[in-house]
Amino acid sequence: MKSVSRVFKALADPTRRQILQELKEGELSAGEITAKFPISGPSISRHLSILKGADLVAERREGNRIVYQLEPEQVAGVVGDFLSAVCPTQVLRNRKRKRSKS
């Protein structure tokens, strides 16, 4: 349950949700992410740290840069599991609808 709490805490902030939106297009360096926002680099760094702590983004070093990428399976898994637990009939209804369209 601890990781679920971390994920929802991370998703609660609009800046972090926007960072995830930016990363859905592909990897970005910390500097590229910072350039997209009207807030300071240290603030973006803190947001990235929270997203990384929730396993919603991964980072890797590329020379002297840190490059971030979205972890879509983690986002989908945690949110999907939560929704399945809270409203299982709705999840089943959506799955049946998708199957019938195939």
Image (cartoon, rainbow, N blue to C red):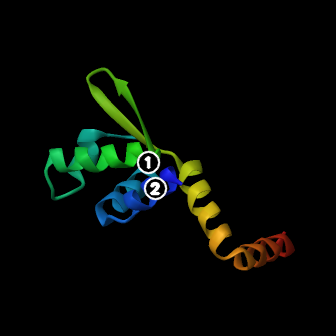
Residue 79: x %, y % from top left: 56, 62
Quarter the C terminus occupies:
bottom right
Which of the 4 image quadrants contains residue 89? bottom right
The span from disc 2 to disc 1 (Cα, nearest Å) is 5 Å
Residue 53: x %, y % from top left: 39, 43
Residue with the mark numbered 1: 54
Answer left or right for 91 relative to 64. Answer: right
Instruction: Classify 7 as above or below 99.
Output: above
Amino acid carrying label 2: it is: Val
Which of the 4 image quadrants contains residue 64? top left
Residue shown at the point (24%, 47%) measured from the top left = 46
Instruction: Classify 11 as above or below 96.
Output: above
Residue shown at the point (56%, 49%) measured from the top left = 74
Amino acid carrying label 1: it is: Ala
Q: Residue furthest left?
A: 40
Label 1, secondary structure: give it: loop
Answer left or right for 76 relative to 65. Answer: right
Instruction: Classify 22 as above or below 102.
Output: above
Residue 10: x %, y % from top left: 38, 57
Residue with the mark numbered 2: 7
Front-most of 81 and 65? Answer: 81
Residue shown at the point (24%, 44%) measured from the top left = 45
Residue shown at the point (47%, 44%) measured from the top left = 55
